[in-house]
Image (cartoon, rainbow, N blue to C red):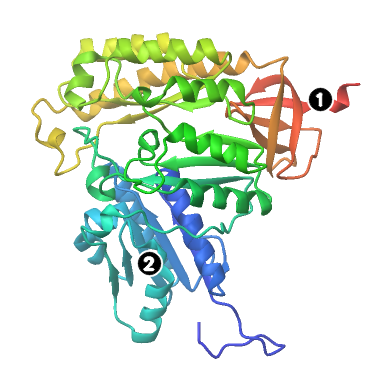
Amino acid sequence: MSETEHTSDHRPVAPTVAFHTLGCKVNQHDSDMMAALFAQAGYDLVPFQDIADVYVINTCTVTHLSDRKSRQMIRRAVKQNPAAIVAVCGCYVQQAAEEVARIEGVDVLIGTNERGRIVEAVEAFRREGERQVRLPSDEDLYTFEPVTHAQHSDRSRAYVKIQEGCNQFCSYCIIPYARGPLRSRSIEDTVSQVRDLVAAGFQEVVLTGIHIGVFGKGLQDAPGDLTDLCRAILEGTDLTRLRLGSIECTEITPALIDLMAGDDRMAPHLHIPLQAGSDRTLAAMHRPYTTEAFRQVMREVRAKIPGLAITTDLMVGFPGESDDDFRDSLIFANDMAFSDMHIFKYSIREGTPAAAMVDQVPAQVKDRRAKQMAVVAHKNKEAYAAGQIGKTLSVIIEENDPTGAVTGHTGNYLKVRLPEDRPPAKSLVPVHITGYENGHLIGRLAADED
């Protein structure tokens, strides 16, 4: 867009920016933050499929498929508007900047701790016409990146990043190399952002990070753990619902369980990554627990929080995973009766210990195992959802679906569709669950039953 282009009433036309986000909820948070920075700089946010002046692709590198999808979206943006500025950021850039730079049409490259400078980099390219590269130094990767409090979003749920980096170094995972070491955000700054989000109309906040269970590590002046942070948010804000992102089973403390059991503003949902249900595979993955330790945590949280939804991540086809190992995983995952499972196939990530392991599992075997595990996941998901029929659950309304019904999520993270009722977006309403079909619950406003 020309800087001299104007509307009919002589006001300058605002430049437009479009985002495409790949990967995890941490990336979604980072995209929301960057969108807010662009909005503060006078840009209008438009859908990615529109012709925009700036395209931002926030990449993921957790698997080779993530890398490929990132490249595809970069090329799509370049093709949609060859005159646009294309900015690529995130983990794929951090790990493979030279590879990304070889893609024709990439104008700005931003690493994993420099996203706050993205508008500055875009404007510098606009002025100078020279590619801008902002990759953090090793020293930068020991500092929690400042976060803008605004979030440019019309969603009912906001993501708040409380922690960055990981020191666990699971043998298959590239993320510690891409995101750097552990660092945490201050409790005071986090509570302040949640307070701002509540004032902006958000009903639910999800605490997210790469390894949130170790929140507080690296905080020198005002240390605290995840339970301290949750308690501070609940006591210091009028937030309707607080949800935790992914947390390791080894980091679910009795104090955290008691807080979740005692305050109904804490969402009754935990995402606890399992990764494998075979002790031999868990040891090879360098995971910090055994299946028995995992099982014990599941018993404890379910005993204290009846009806708790527990979702998980599970990998198939890790190097050396035998048929017996996979059978153990299949049986264990079924026994745990997760309310939902994210199943993914092992992907070689160069530079990780697993990439050099012998006995890589053939692709066709991974495909078969993924399908078998999906059968177990589907069965348990359906059983958990069916158990909600007849209950009245609190639902935050989020959007209209194509049929005109409204949808939202319960505290235990089930999607609910209301075919007849039309409560406004972002409202919290009691919903009587009447059925389950096509992957979501069906309900009606509880107030309408009288």
Eyeballing the image, is 439 above or below 4?
A: above
Q: For the point 23% across and 59% down, which residue is it?
A: 139
Q: Return the mark for residue 84.
A: none
Q: For the point 40% across and 30% down, which residue is it?
A: 247
Q: In the depicted view, which residue is nearer to us: 168 or 285?
A: 168
Eyeballing the image, is 8 above or below 344?
A: below
- Relative horizontal placement of residue 444, taking residue 235 as reference (left or right): right
Q: Return the mark for residue 446.
A: 1
Give the percent coordinates (x, y) of residue 415.
Answer: 62, 31
**Quarter occupied by the C terminus:** top right
Residue 51 shows up from this direction: no
Q: For the point 42% across and 12% down, which residue is it?
A: 336
Q: Which kind of residue does numbered mark 2 sit on? A: Ala
Dot 2 lies on which element?
strand
Q: Return the mark for residue 87.
A: 2
Q: For the point 67% across and 30% down, which residue is it?
A: 416
Q: Which kind of residue does numbered mark 1 sit on? A: Ala
Count of residue discs? 2
Eyeballing the image, is 440 above or below 16?
A: above
- Whether pointer 1 and pointer 2 mark residues with C-beta atoms closer than 8 Å, the reply is no
**Which of pointers 1 and 2 lies earlier in the amino acid sequence?**
2
> Quadrant location of residue 407?
top right
Closest to the camera, between mark 1 and mark 2, is 1
Whole-angstrom CA distance, mark 1 to mark 2, is 47 Å
Give the percent coordinates (x, y) of residue 159.
Answer: 52, 46
> Quadrant location of residue 169?
top left
Give the class, few, some or many, for how many residues have Cα within 10 Å of label 2's Cα (few <14, many ≥20).
many
Give the percent coordinates (x, y) of residue 208.
Answer: 45, 41
> Quadrant location of residue 88?
bottom left
Give the class, few, some or many, for how many residues have Cα within 10 Å of label 1's Cα (few <14, many ≥20).
some
Residue 239 shows up from this direction: yes
